[in-house]
Image (cartoon, coloured by chain):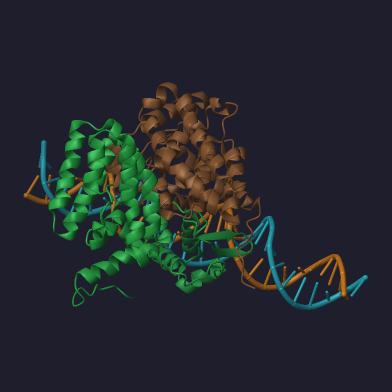
Chain colours: A brown, B green, C orange, D cyan
Amino acid sequence: MQPSVPSSSPSGSARRGLLTERIARELEHDIRSGEIAVGTKLPSERELAAQFGASRNVVREVLRRLEAQHLIEVAPGRGSFVREQSSGQARGYDALYRAGRPTVRQLIEARIPLEVEMVRLATERATEEDIAAMRAARDGLESATDVVVKAQADMEFHDAIAVASKNPVLRIMLSSIGGMMFEMMLRSNSDPSIGEPGVPHHPEIFEAIEARDVDLACARMREHLMLGLRTYGADLDVQVDTMARNHIETLLGQTEGRRTSAGR
Amino acid sequence: MQPSVPSSSPSGSARRGLLTERIARELEHDIRSGEIAVGTKLPSERELAAQFGASRNVVREVLRRLEAQHLIEVAPGRGSFVREQSSGQARGYDALYRAGRPTVRQLIEARIPLEVEMVRLATERATEEDIAAMRAARDGLESATDVVVKAQADMEFHDAIAVASKNPVLRIMLSSIGGMMFEMMLRSNSDPSIGEPGVPHHPEIFEAIEARDVDLACARMREHLMLGLRTYGADLDVQVDTMARNHIETLLGQTEGRRTSAGR
DNA sequence: TGGTCCAACTGGTAGGACCAGTTGGTCTAC
DNA sequence: GTAGACCAACTGGTCCTACCAGTTGGACCA
């Protein structure tokens, strides 16, 4: 028999590397949420280690991970810096993004044809594995409490559908707007009005896909996406990045606190 | 003043972390190329360290990086395993592109919902300027003789529609597959069978947009794109890049252009 | 045969040490 | 006074040793 990938026990990746995982998530959260501004120099490895009560080894591994995620940039002899990435790690489209400065309404408008088509194909073509991936992402969103984690799970669900569509081109297109989607989801997932009754969300969409009901899946995806048109209100015609920045400030305002500036 | 991100000298990230970088690249290559099969258990950290003549620290940082790239999975007490890539959601465009290797058929399949939506919006929203840009691109294609120039004009026409749609998100998505589209157009525009009678091309699409006939414009765009499904024949299920390479070689005549591939 | 148990192995974490760049301030020479 | 040399402090890169907690498989006993 062939060696099999560890079945990644349910608790597996959660329990694993407790310390490293925790610190990585914390830093990742602070960076993604904008709490640590772009361009800021992080404390030195030794300092971070002391701050988190961990060894320098652990901190270095965390930094390596963040670096692989393009969240930071590490310069020997100088330090680590938060990297620009909010909406673009892809190449050429940065300029486009900045030039266009899409609004929430435009993002929704563009996602509809793309994601409806994706879900159509996915409903026809999804394998058991694809279904499992979607289920996992759905559960991940349900059980998450942190906004960033929620947004990640949200992204994963939509990406899982892209994978299931068996069309890499669709997935590339989806990923090209991933940054914007993420920013939008940061807000969506902290908005109570998304609980609006009768609106189909991941579970309902997933259900339709699993039942292989193409029309239902498409309809639910469309409704799911259109919900934003009703709930975003005044933010609908605000640039996505602007809205994200404002929203993050609001979130931080509620939990305010530390914000340690490393003055020395 | 705000601290600025280090200007990341060209050689910067190349010179940095020589050892870690080297080992990471080597392992990454071996995994991506399939030299190390999926599911395989990597040697233990201590073993890898000895093998590469590096310390365990370095190896661990490399593994952390590969893990962040979803290339491997690390299980405490058991070891590290090469992870299935297709179903894993890798972030980043190249990973997507390389993993997916879209075919011509998939490219067409994905362009249809995107471009039909674009043309729908463009027909409703295009300004006089937008119309002028489209007209220019149409004329450019008509008058061009060189294949490359033709392909460029072709791209311009579709991009002009994207601009006219007044939705920068759609344009970003279009641009994210621009490379593939260009490769495909290199061939389309040197194929005599595109002259097939009754098939709407740029002039007909442009005409419908100018006449503000939404349904007609959508229908013509759809037909225009679907033409490829009939004319590409055997190439339909060939990877776009592969097809482009083959086709370009044909174009260049068989004598020349032995592309030097750096074997190591 | 079936279960227990232990030894070997694996990754996770700690903490120390040294090197080679980078940086900013001091001190010297002009 | 200023330009330049120079040095000390700091930063990341690498190595090493040690110990812990799971995992695994085989030896051993009931």
Q: Is residue A39 visible?
A: no
- In which quarter of the view is residue A234 placed? top left
- Residue B37 lies, with reference to residue A152, above or below; the image says below
Question: How many marks overall?
Answer: 0
Give percent across and percent down for residue A213: 58, 45
- Residue A242 lies, with reference to residue B63, above or below; the image says above
- Left or right of A161? Residue B142 is left
Give percent across and percent down for residue A143: 62, 39
Which of the two residues, A32 or C11, is positioned nearer the viewer here? Answer: A32
- Residue A234 lies, with reference to residue A181, above or below; the image says above
- In which quarter of the view is residue B171 placed? top left
* Quadrant in the picture for the N terminus of chain B: top left
Give percent across and percent down for residue D22: 69, 58
Which of the two residues, B234 or B81, is positioned nearer the viewer here? Answer: B234
Which of the two residues, B154 or A86, is positioned nearer the viewer here? Answer: B154
- Residue B61 lies, with reference to residue D27, above or below; the image says above
Q: Is residue B144 visible?
A: yes
- Left or right of A151? Residue B242 is left
Give percent across and percent down for residue B103: 39, 60
- Left or right of A179? Residue B254 is left
Q: Residue at 57% across / 26% down in the picture?
A: A196
Which of the two residues, A17 or A7, is positioned nearer the viewer here? Answer: A7
Q: Residue at 59% across / 35% down in the picture?
A: A145
Q: Residue furthest top?
A: A234
* Quadrant in the picture for the C terminus of chain B: bottom left
